[in-house]
Amino acid sequence: EVQLVESGGGLVQPGESLRLSCTASGFKFSTYTMNWIRQVPGKGFEWVSSIVAGTGTEYYLDSVKGRFAISRDNAKSTLYLQMNSLKTEDTGVYYCTTGVVRSTGGPRGQGTQVTVSS
């Protein structure tokens, strides 16, 4: 059974940073492309970033390029999202998922709330 557990969210002010983590189990993590997606209240899911298995190629939503960095530790089956220079529009519930690049589908965990507010 695929299990994904996100953590690291919180309440921060604009310009501050957070590091999200996602611990995976139930599948061979190292062979799967992993994504971060987010859900803003009243809206659907929005893809944020992907990291490809093997090559480690990274992809980012235009609005987070240069501020967010996705990474993975295959030995720990853990996915990360370093978020710097956070903006109010980054507020939402962040989920990690498995799947193809830029996808919002696939299994996901319970999510972690990120709130950026002054």
Image (cartoon, rainbow, N blue to C red):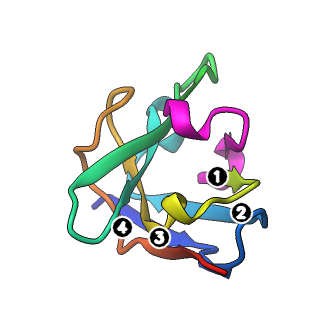
Type of residue at label 1?
A: Leu
Image coords of residue 14 (percent x, y): 71, 68
Please give the label number shown on residue 41: none
Q: Earlier in the sequence, mark 4 or mark 3?
A: 3
Is 9 located above or below residue 48 in the figure? Answer: below
Which residue is identified by label 3?
5
Mark 4 residue element: loop
Q: Which residue is mark 1?
A: 81
Viewer-proximal residue among 47 and 32: 47
Above or below, comparing residue 13 to residue 104 in the picture: below
Residue underneath mark 2:
19
Question: Could you tell me how far apart the alpha carbons at marks 3 and 2 are, in whole angstroms?
Answer: 14 Å
- C-alpha gap between disc 4 and disc 3: 5 Å
In the image, residue 77 lies in the stretch drawn in magenta: yes
Q: For the C terminus, give its image quadrant.
A: bottom right
Q: Estimate how packed mark 4 is, as few (under 14), some (14 to 19) or many (20 or more) residues with alpha carbons within 10 Å.
A: some
Q: Are marks 4 and 3 in contact (CB under 8 Å)?
A: yes
> What is the span of residues highlighted in magenta in the rendered image?
61-79
- Residue 15 horizontal/vertical position (percent): 77, 62
Q: Nearer the viewer, mark 4 or mark 1?
A: 1
The span from disc 2 to disc 4 (Cα, nearest Å) is 17 Å
Type of the residue with mark 3: Val
Name which residue type carries label 4: Gly
Indicate which disc, 2 or 4, sits on the residue closer to the N terminus.
Answer: 2
Q: Which mark is residue 109?
A: 4
